Image (cartoon, grey):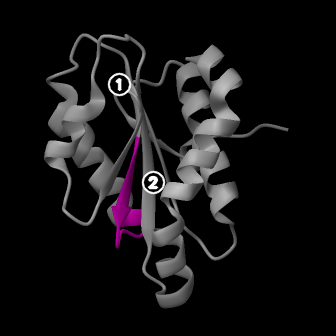
C-alpha cells in the first residue's frame, strides 16, 4: 500500500476532493458537518464494497480499489463521525478478522480546505500502516508528535 499511496496518492486525493465537493458546499453554506473515513485492507483479496451495506442513505462510499475506499458520513461532526467510523469498523471486523484493516478519519472544519482535509486523511492512513495500527480508527488527536 505504501507504494500505491506514493504513486497514486495525488490522483486518489483529487478524486476524493471531487467526491466531497457537495458535502463541502453544504458545510460552508449551511454549516452541515461531514466526516471522511478511509479504509484499507493490506491483503488484496479483501473487498471493502461490503461496507455499503452498513451505511445510511445520506452517506457515500467511494471505491478506489477493492481493498481501498473512503466513506463520507453526512451530517456528522467530529464526535459522531468518529462514532460512525467505529461502528462501521465493528460491523465489518468479523468479515476481515484475519486481515489487516486500517482506518483513519477526519472531520471538516472552518480552518481547513477540502484539499487539506483529504491530504491529512491520507497522511493518517499512511501513519496507521507505517505503525501497524490496524483494526482501529485513527484520528489526528491520537498521534503524539515529538520535537
Residue position marked by numbered label 1 in the rendering = 66
Secondary structure state at the residue bearing disc 2:
strand
Q: Are marks 1 and 2 in contact (CB under 8 Å)?
A: no
Examine the image and state in which quarter residue 77 appears. bottom left
Up-down: is 109 above or below 105?
below
Residue 96: say if magenta. no
Q: Residue at x 25, y 33 (%)?
A: 49
Name the residue located 50 percent from the left edge and 18 percent from the top edge: 132
The foreground one among 34 and 132 is: 34
What's the mark number on residue 36?
Answer: 2
Q: CA distance from mark 1 to mark 2?
A: 18 Å
Q: Residues within 10 Å of mark 2 (few under 14, many from 20)?
A: many
x 69%, y 56%: residue: 116
Give the secondary structure at mark 1. loop
Q: Is residue 75 above or below residue 8?
A: below
> Can see residue 120?
no
Question: Where does residue 75 sit, x and y in percent of width and height?
Answer: 34, 73
Q: Is residue 107 left or right of residue 11?
A: left
Q: Nearer the viewer, mark 1 or mark 2?
A: 1
Which contiguous range is marked in magenta?
Answer: 70-79
Q: Earlier in the sequence, mark 1 or mark 2?
A: 2
Q: Does the rendering let one see residue 98? A: yes
Q: Nearer the viewer, residue 78 or 39?
A: 39
Task: Tell whether position 75 is magenta.
Answer: yes
Residue 15 position, x and y percent, is: 56, 46
Left/right placement of residue 139 relative to residue 53 reads right
Q: Outermost residue, right direction?
A: 147
- State which quadrant residue 121 falls in: top right
Task: Name the residue nearer the viewer: 30 or 18.
Answer: 18
Quarter in which the C terminus is drawn: top right
Relative to 71, residue 3 above or below: above
Q: Give how far across and how far down residue 59 sits, in percent.
A: 29, 60
Amino acid at each position: 500500500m505504501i507504494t500505491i499511496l506514493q504513486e497514486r496518492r495525488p490522483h486518489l486525493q483529487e478524486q476524493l476532493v471531487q467526491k466531497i465537493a457537495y458535502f463541502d458546499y453544504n458545510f460552508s453554506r449551511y454549516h452541515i458537518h461531514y466526516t471522511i473515513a478511509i479504509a484499507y485492507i493490506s491483503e488484496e483479496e479483501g473487498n471493502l464494497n461490503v461496507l455499503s451495506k452498513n451505511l445510511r442513505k445520506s452517506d457515500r462510499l467511494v471505491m478506489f480499489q477493492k481493498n481501498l475506499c473512503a466513506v463520507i458520513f453526512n451530517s456528522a461532526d467530529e464526535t459522531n463521525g468518529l462514532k460512525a467510523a467505529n461502528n462501521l469498523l465493528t460491523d465489518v471486523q468479523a468479515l476481515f478478522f484475519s486481515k489487516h484493516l486500517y482506518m483513519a478519519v477526519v472531520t471538516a472544519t472552518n480552518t481547513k480546505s477540502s484539499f487539506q482535509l483529504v491530504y491529512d486523511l491520507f497522511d493518517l492512513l499512511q501513519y496507521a500502516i507505517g505503525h501497524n495500527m490496524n483494526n482501529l480508527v485513527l484520528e489526528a488527536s491520537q498521534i503524539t508528535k515529538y520535537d
